[in-house]
């Protein structure tokens, strides 16, 4: 067994302190004992310090014997191919440059390629070389977005290292049970013991793991201690039921509507409203339906003006949606999750209306509004300036209920002059609506948006598209960048989109970009030097795409 040294109080302790003081004051003000002031004093001080250092080290004695650490566990996964291991070492050795608006040049940003490399390596099931684990843990320590993929790739040996180095303790906190394996589903005794005695993080991890495999078992486990849990813990546990949410969860959620915590009640109501067949959804449908109806006595002319009297007919007029917002928030509404107090600057009636419509099943409106389709309903005029409030609530309902048909109707055509659909009042809302569509349809819509409106508003929409970008979306982004370059636009205005393209554009697009590498002729109104910046940016994009292709090939991925 090894013995580590510990210090003891040696007779020369006061001497050492005196030498330290002399060094701090300087030998022109104080000299070592037995030394006269003068040019030889500094050397005498160093000699005395050397002698005292030997004496102090000789005064150390062994500490109590400690057990050696257990060997690191074996990682059964196959080793990385040699080329991929060298690439990983290169990515980990790179350090991000200084922040600011400085010129990046044409060299790729290797730190931004590490997440993609880890994703491919994890998909292939490789194990890391042991010697890179410290650098990998250091990288994950500095970037929280990197931690899930880095810890998955690092495997069990990362947890072994994390127990030996306090700087890497985040790996233990990020792993269910501090690195201990969760009990198997059939091991009911261990599950119950961990649920009853475990730390809060361990209990959350256990509940989430059970919910992903056996939703009913997780819900039943939660019910055993629900009444004794703290309000903040109940809220976190209830949120875990989002995964695998289904009709069988309704009785538990309905019971939670009477919880003593307002936040728990609100979360239970939100989850129930995401179940269109729930009793709460039916109650909300009745309330919302009483507020929204077709007004056949008021029609809209083709120009959009609402007129009293008449009905839809040969003159081209269409019915109008009439809205009568609630006049009060009764106890039943509050129990079902409606928040009575409106935010500052918001009218109470519009606040209550939005919550009712948001929680009502979207199928309600076809029955309520004359059998019309979502697209036809969204196209109807709304009286008395209620359209923005009503459509915004439908947007939230479409996202909550994951209703693609309503999302399409609210998004409208990507080439619409107002750069969005009739109900999408913000880019953030459009991005959420796009999230309910399939990856291919989402990419096609964003490509159409970029073709019609350019890149100035597209950054947030690009963030919800799958990686790598589908071919139509990639072409639309490159074409828009090329148009901006030819127009002499400021290249740094598109640095965010260019950075996304480096990470998300399909590497096969690299050959199509070769024609953009030359410095373009600058128009008269162009920003000075913009052409050189654009050439560097496209060179960096092409280099990065080819590097990503090489990484994928080295990892043996198709």
Image (cartoon, grey):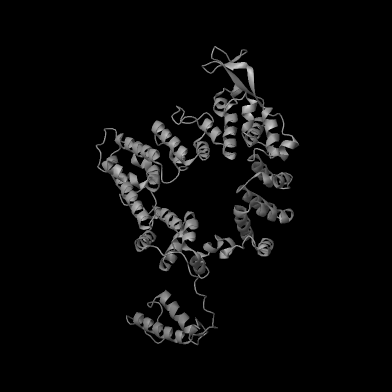
Q: Work out whether residue 489 can be spotted.
A: no
* Residue 388 as seen in the image, left or right of residue 257: left
Q: Measured from the top left, where is residue 465 in percent x and y? A: 45, 42
Query: What is the x, y in percent for residue 43?
Result: 34, 81
Q: How many marks?
A: 0
At 42% from the left and 55% from the top, the residue drawn is: 120
> What residue lies at 51% left-to-right and 16% top-to-bottom?
303
Whole-percent x, y for residue 157 in the image: 49, 67
Q: Nearer the viewer, residue 289 or 331?
A: 289
Question: Which residue does the image show at 25% across and 41% down from the upper left?
Answer: 519
Is residue 266 shown left or right of residue 19? right
Q: Is residue 524 above or below residue 245?
A: above
Above or below: residue 166 compared with residue 206: below
At which x and y percent is residue 272? Answer: 66, 42
Comparing 274 with 422, the one in front is 274
Q: Is residue 87 visible?
A: yes
Depth check: give the residue in front, 315 or 124. 124
Residue under the image location 63 percent in, 46 percent down: 245
In-image side of 39 versus 8 (left or right): left
């Amino acid at each position: 067994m090894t013995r580590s040294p510990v210090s003891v109080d040696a007779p020369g302790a006061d001497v050492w302190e005196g030498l330290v003081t002399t060094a701090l004051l300087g030998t022109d003000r104080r000299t070592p004992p037995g030394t006269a002031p003068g040019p030889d004093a500094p050397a005498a001080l160093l000699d005395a310090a050397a002698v005292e250092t030997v004496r102090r080290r000789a005064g150390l004695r062994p500490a109590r014997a400690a057990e050696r650490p257990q060997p690191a566990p074996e990682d059964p996964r196959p080793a990385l191919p040699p080329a991929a291991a060298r690439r990983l070492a290169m990515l980990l050795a790179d350090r991000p440059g200084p922040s600011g608006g400085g010129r990046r040049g044409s060299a790729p940003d290797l730190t931004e390629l590490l997440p993609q490399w880890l994703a491919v390596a994890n998909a292939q099931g490789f194990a890391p070389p042991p010697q890179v684990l410290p650098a990998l843990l250091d990288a994950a320590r500095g970037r929280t977005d990197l931690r899930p993929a880095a810890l998955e790739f690092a495997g069990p040996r990362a947890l072994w290292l994390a127990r030996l180095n306090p700087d890497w303790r985040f790996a233990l906190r990020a792993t269910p049970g501090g690195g201990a394996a969760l009990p198997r589903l059939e091991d009911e005794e261990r599950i119950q013991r961990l649920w009853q005695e475990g730390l809060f993080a361990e209990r959350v991890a256990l509940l989430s793991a059970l919910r992903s495999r056996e939703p009913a078992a997780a819900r039943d486990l939660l019910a055993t201690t629900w009444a004794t849990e703290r309000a903040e813990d109940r809220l976190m546990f209830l949120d875990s039921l989002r995964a695998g949410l289904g009709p069988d969860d309704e009785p538990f959620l309905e019971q939670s509507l009477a919880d003593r915590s307002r936040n728990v009640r609100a979360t239970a109501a939100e989850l129930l409203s995401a179940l269109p067949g729930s009793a709460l959804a039916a109650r909300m449908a009745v309330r919302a339906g009483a507020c929204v109806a077709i007004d056949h006595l008021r029609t809209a002319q083709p120009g959009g003006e609402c007129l009293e009297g008449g009905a839809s007919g040969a003159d081209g007029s269409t019915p109008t949606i009439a809205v009568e917002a609630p006049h009060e928030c009764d106890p039943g509404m509050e129990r079902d999750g409606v928040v009575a107090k409106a935010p500052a600057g918001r009218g109470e009636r519009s606040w209550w209306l939005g919550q009712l419509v948001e929680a009502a099943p979207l199928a309600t409106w076809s029955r309520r509004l004359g059998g019309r389709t979502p697209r036809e309903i969204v196209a109807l005029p709304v009286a008395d300036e209620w359209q923005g409030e009503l459509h915004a609530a439908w947007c939230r309902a479409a996202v909550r209920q994951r209703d693609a048909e309503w999302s399409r109707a609210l998004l409208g055509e990507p080439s619409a002059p107002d750069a969005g659909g009739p109900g999408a009042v913000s880019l953030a809302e459009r991005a959420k609506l796009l999230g309910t569509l399939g990856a291919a349809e989402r990419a096609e819509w964003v490509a159409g948006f970029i073709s019609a409106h350019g890149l100035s508003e597209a950054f947030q929409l690009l963030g919800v598209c799958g990686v790598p970008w589908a071919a139509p979306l990639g072409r639309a982004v490159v074409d828009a960048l090329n148009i901006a370059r030819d127009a002499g636009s400021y290249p740094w205005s598109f640095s965010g989109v260019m950075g996304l393209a480096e990470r998300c554009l399909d590497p096969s697009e690299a050959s199509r970009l070769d024609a953009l590498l030359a410095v373009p002729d600058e128009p008269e109104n162009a920003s000075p030097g913009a052409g050189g910046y654009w050439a560097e940016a496209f060179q960096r994009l092409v280099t990065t795409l080819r590097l990503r292709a090489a990484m994928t090939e080295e990892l043996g991925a198709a």
